[in-house]
Amino acid sequence: MGTRALAAILALGVLAFVGVFILTTVWTLDPRETTSADGSPTASVSERLSDGQLDVQVFALSNQEVRLEIQFMPNADAIETAGMRPDVNFAMAAMHMDGVTPPLALVEAGVWRAKVKLPMAGRWVVSVGFGEEFAEVEFDAR
């Protein structure tokens, strides 16, 4: 009877430990950290520039990785910016440090994509634009 009672107490202890571990993980999960089933972006901005429409979508993935999707639809008279690659810079919000400039991959005319691993978690601002005109959007990298 003593070994059965000891085995039952040990099994209950293991079960309680596993239960607490699972419940703690579920309770502390931030909904913003999960990837939505429909693939919606973490943050996005649509900005009307003098030469066209700039749409930026930020997808904050896990482990400080971020995917950036940019689409620029130039106006009919925008000859200069029609073939230009936008300037992109990631900077930490409220920090005075150098930003991260990722390489952009041209997907198709006017559409670029970048994937970057940021150096630390926190609140980031990404600036995308041409010359003096930029669209900015803030997001949390985790």
Image (cartoon, rainbow, N blue to C red):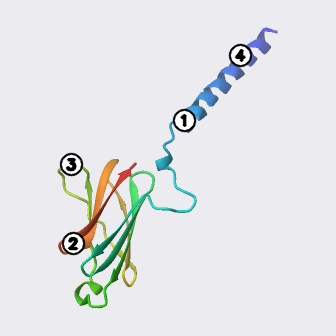
Classify residue 108 by image quadrant.
bottom left
**In the rendered structure, which amino acid carries the disc numbered 3?**
Met
Element marked by disc 3: loop
Extreme right residue here?
A: 1
- 46 horizontally vs 17: left or right: left
Task: Check disc 2 and report the residue beneath it.
Answer: 133
Q: Is residue 82 above or below residue 136?
A: below
Q: Give residue 127's quadrant in the image.
A: bottom left
Number of other residues with Cα within 10 Å of mark 4, as a class: few under 14, some 14 to 19, many 20 or more? few
Measure how far apart labels 3 and 2 are at the Cα level: 22 Å
**Alpha carbon separation for disc pair 4 and 1:** 26 Å
Give the mark nearer the N terminus: 3 vs 2: 3
Task: Tell me the amino acid under the disc marked 2.
Answer: Glu
Give amino acid for label 1. Answer: Trp
Q: In the rendered image, which residue does mark 4 sit on?
A: 9
Residue at the spot 24% in from the left edge and 79% down from the top edge: 50
> What's the mark number on residue 27?
1
Report x, y in % for residue 69. Answer: 40, 69
Residue 43: image x %, image y %? 40, 59
What label sits on residue 101 in the rendered view? none
